[in-house]
Structure formats: C-alpha cells, structure tokens
Image: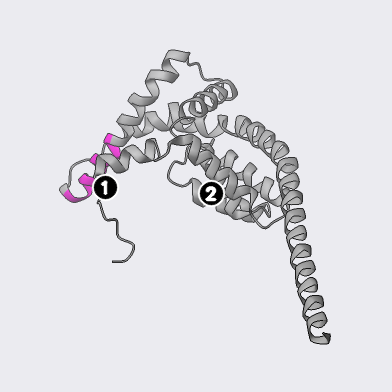
Amino acid sequence: MVFKRRNKRSWPRVIWEVIYPKGGWARAFHYVKHRVRRLPDSPERIARGIFVGVFTSFTPFYGLHFLISFVLARVMNANMLAALLATFFGNPLTYVPIAYASLKTGFWITGMTADAEHVRHGFGEMFYGASRDLLFNLKALFTGQPAEWHGLRDFYDDVFFPYMIGGIIPGIVTGLVCYYLSVPVIRAYQKRRNKGVLKARLARLKEKSSENTDQKAAEKS
C-alpha cells in the first residue's frame, strides 16, 4: 500500500503518542492554532466553533466529543472544522483540571458533599468500578450470569451526573473567554493575509504590464 507506514508502531507507542503526541503538545497546539486561523470563514463563525469545541471538552462524554461538537456547531451555525479542532482543548494535560473544576461545580450545584480528596482519588476508583461492571455485564450476556450494576450506579450518582451538570458553567465561561480572545486575533490575521494576497496580485499585474510594455516596444523597434 502507498500510504502504509514503513515502520509499524507498537501498541505501547500508539498509546504513548495519544498521551504525548510526536513533537510535543506545544507543537500540536501551534498546528491546531495555525489551522484554525487559516479557515476560510468569518471570524465570528470560527470563534463560535472554538466556543463549541472548548465547551464540549467540559462534558463527561469521552469518545463522543467530536459528535457532540458537530451537532452543536450545526445548531449554533458555527464553523464545524473549528469546533472539531477546538475539542483538543481537552487533552491529557487538561483533563484533570477540567474534571476537578466540573466535579466541584457539580457538587456545589447539586448540594452533594465531597472533599478534595474524594474528587482526586475517588474518581479513579469509581471509573475502574464502572468499567469493570460494564465489561462483566457484557460477558453476562453470553454466559447467563446475573448482571451487576452497583459500580455503574455509584459512578453515575457520584461522578457522571455531577460532572455533567457541573461542566456547564466552567465550560461556558472558558468557551466565552476563548471566543472573545479569538475574534480579534482571527480578524487581524485575515486582514494581514488578505493584504498580503492583494499585494502579491498587484505585483503580478505590474510585472505583467511591464512585460507587455517591453514586448510592444521591442515590436516597434
């Protein structure tokens, strides 16, 4: 195959590059920023897409962020590619503070009591319990064993629901900050790019006019 990798990556390598991409997260961030700024759309629509992607990063629907941002972008008439790229606001470097802020806000809104230690250490244990129950229940479909929903129920009550509710406020606030920061930056970049394109066109026209003048002068002589 033409596009097949010459050196096949191992599974540990693939997992590591998801956590830490080749070239580092700084390079990945600059690549996303460069792609967003060059999108052929109005600054407002692109910024709305950024808002959608950032807001989606604060939802607990991991694995569905692309789909959710796509739907929200359609509803808000935002740039879809900008929304998809902005979901990378949620990455292994930001998931912990995002989850912490969302859970703490969710506990405050719902009136649940949970200290910082519960949020930091209990989250991993509950996620493990939910994953274990889900795998066990999938196997139970084929083995006839009784399903066990205790871990999933605890995970939903203590983590997923407060995370889902609590992610709304910090998601909107962070998304709005990114929106209002993005609009002037994108507008300035587009003006500079359009000015450069116009100068290049004028230079080509001037060069072509000069060539035609020289050609006519040569024909007369």
Q: Is residue 105 left or right of residue 122?
A: right
Quadrant in the picture for the C terminus: bottom right
Q: Give the number of the disc on residue 68.
A: 2
79 versus 88 height, above or below: below
Question: Is the C-beta separation of discs 2 and 1 under 8 Å?
Answer: no
Q: Alpha-carbon neighbours of circle 2 within 10 Å: few (<14), some, or many (≥20)?
A: some
Q: Which residue is mark 1?
A: 9
Residue in the image at 28% along x and 41% along y: 13
Q: Alpha-carbon neighbours of circle 1 within 10 Å: few (<14), some, or many (≥20)?
A: few
**Image position, residue 1 (x, y; %):** 28, 66
Residue in the image at 33% along x and 24% along y: 125
**Image position, residue 87 (x, y; %):** 53, 43
Q: Who is closer to the viewer here, 183 or 140? A: 183
Secondary structure beneath dot 1 equals: loop
**Image position, residue 78 (x, y; %):** 66, 52
First along the sequence among labels 2 and 1: 1
Residue in the image at 44% along x and 20% along y: 119
Q: Amino acid at mark 2?
A: Ile
Query: Would residue 18 be counted in the magenta stretch?
Result: no
Q: Who is closer to the viewer here, 154 or 30? A: 30
Seen as rendered, the residue at the extreme left is 143
Which region of the structure is painted magenta?
132-142
Residue in the image at 49% along x and 39% along y: 27
